[in-house]
Image (cartoon, grey):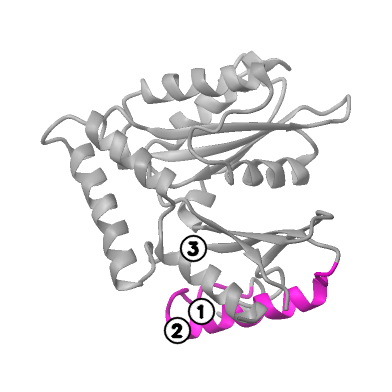
């Protein structure tokens, strides 16, 4: 199988097949929900939808989102060859109906019709130095993207200083602001530091972690667990119907920053956390 076909398979699988860790987290949330509640009904619908998408090979969500490829490239993988193969795979998946026509020219307002255009798809390229290249694809819908937010600390309205307590206050504020919007229960990717651009990039990369995968930094791992409990005690619940599961997880990363800046960048992912990884056979 050539690179084009492998990447097409990756696009299809990402669009139609919810990862096991995410599905397991939804099942756990369902087991905690109150019988007969709106939250229970919403979670049952989500799980039924995921099963149906897998069976019928159809998109889990009608908004197939921004396509973000993260490539850990071996020395033999050429960037231009990958880009060409990825663009072919995206256009072909769109033709097959596995991806919605989802790319709009910001100046003309016209849809490109094949999900290709300036900045689409997004490719993050890393020279890994390994013998085999790994490619991860994440699809991120517009509803969840709209719930992303960035804070600049200190923030007097939140009483948030330049420390982890300040970060905590920002994250809880973001969850409260979102309520059920963005299709809760959500997953938060957070970056402490960086500049405005790199902070958001890092926050999205955090969303590639599996449910329950804690930060290697002990203080951040502790904060992740605390925030998950606190967010789920807010009572917002699935789709904002009220309930016990507002978030499925919180992932916090960090980057160095300038002395003058202290950003907290938060990317919100909906319950439909679509991400898959393949090892690329380069032949």
Does the magenta segment cover residue 104? Answer: yes
Residue in the foreground of this view, choosing between 219 and 264: 219
Q: Alpha-carbon neighbours of circle 2 within 10 Å: few (<14), some, or many (≥20)?
A: few
Q: Nearer the viewer, residue 8 or 61?
A: 8
In the image, residue 178 sits, relative to residue 227, either above or below, namely below
Q: Residue at x 47, y 31 (%)?
A: 175
* x, y percent for residue 11: 53, 70
State how far apart marks 3 and 1 are (Cα): 11 Å
**What residue lies at 57% left-to-right and 63% top-to-bottom?**
66
Rounded to the nearest angstrom, the CA distance separating label 2 from label 1 is: 5 Å
Q: Residue at x 60, y 22 (%)?
A: 221
Residue 96's mark? 2
Mark 2 and 3 residues: CB-CB less than 8 Å, in contact?
A: no
Q: Residue at x 77, y 27 (%)?
A: 262
Label number found at residue 83: none
Rendered position, 128 above or below 113: above
CA gap, disc 2 to disc 3? 14 Å
In the picture of the structure, the residue carrying the numbered disc 1 is 93
Question: Is residue 200 visible from the viewing direction of this image?
Answer: yes
Residue assigned mark 3: 14
Q: Secondary structure at mark 3?
A: helix
**Which badge, 3 or 1, comes first in the chain's sequence?**
3
Magenta highlight range? 76-105
Q: Is disc 1 placed on a helix, strand or loop? A: helix
Camera-side residue of 131 and 236 = 131
Q: Nearer the viewer, residue 158 or 258?
A: 258
Please say if the residues under marks 2 and 1 sit with CB atoms less than 8 Å apart: yes
The answer to whether 231 appears left or right of 83 in the picture is left
């Amino acid at each position: 199988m050539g690179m084009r076909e492998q990447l097409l398979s990756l696009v299809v699988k990402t669009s139609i097949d919810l990862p096991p860790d995410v599905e397991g987290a939804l099942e756990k949330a369902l087991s905690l929900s109150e019988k007969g509640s709106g939250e229970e009904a919403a979670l049952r619908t989500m799980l039924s939808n995921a099963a149906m998408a897998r069976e019928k090979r159809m998109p889990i969500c009608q908004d197939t989102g921004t396509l973000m490829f993260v490539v850990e490239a071996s020395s033999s993988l050429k960037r231009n060859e990958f880009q060409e193969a990825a663009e072919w795979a995206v256009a072909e998946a769109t033709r097959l109906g596995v991806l919605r026509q989802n790319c709009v020219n910001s100046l003309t307002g016209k849809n490109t019709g094949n999900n290709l255009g300036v900045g689409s798809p997004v490719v993050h390229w890393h020279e890994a130095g390994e013998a085999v290249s790994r490619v991860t694809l994440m699809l991120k819908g517009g509803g969840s993207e709209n719930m992303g937010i960035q804070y600049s600390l200190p923030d007097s309205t939140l009483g948030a200083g330049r420390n982890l307590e300040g970060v905590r206050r920002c994250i809880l504020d973001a969850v409260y602001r979102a309520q059920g919007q963005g299709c809760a229960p959500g997953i938060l990717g957070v970056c402490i530091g960086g500049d405005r651009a790199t902070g958001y990039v890092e926050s999205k990369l955090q969303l590639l972690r599996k449910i329950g995968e804690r930060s290697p930094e002990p203080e951040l791992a502790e904060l992740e667990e605390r925030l998950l409990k606190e967010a789920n005690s807010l009572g917002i619940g699935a789709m904002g119907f009220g309930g016990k599961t507002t978030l499925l997880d919180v992932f916090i990363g960090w980057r160095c920053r300038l002395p003058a800046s202290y950003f907290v960048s938060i990317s919100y992912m909906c319950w439909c956390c679509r991400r898959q990884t393949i090892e690329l056979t380069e032949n």
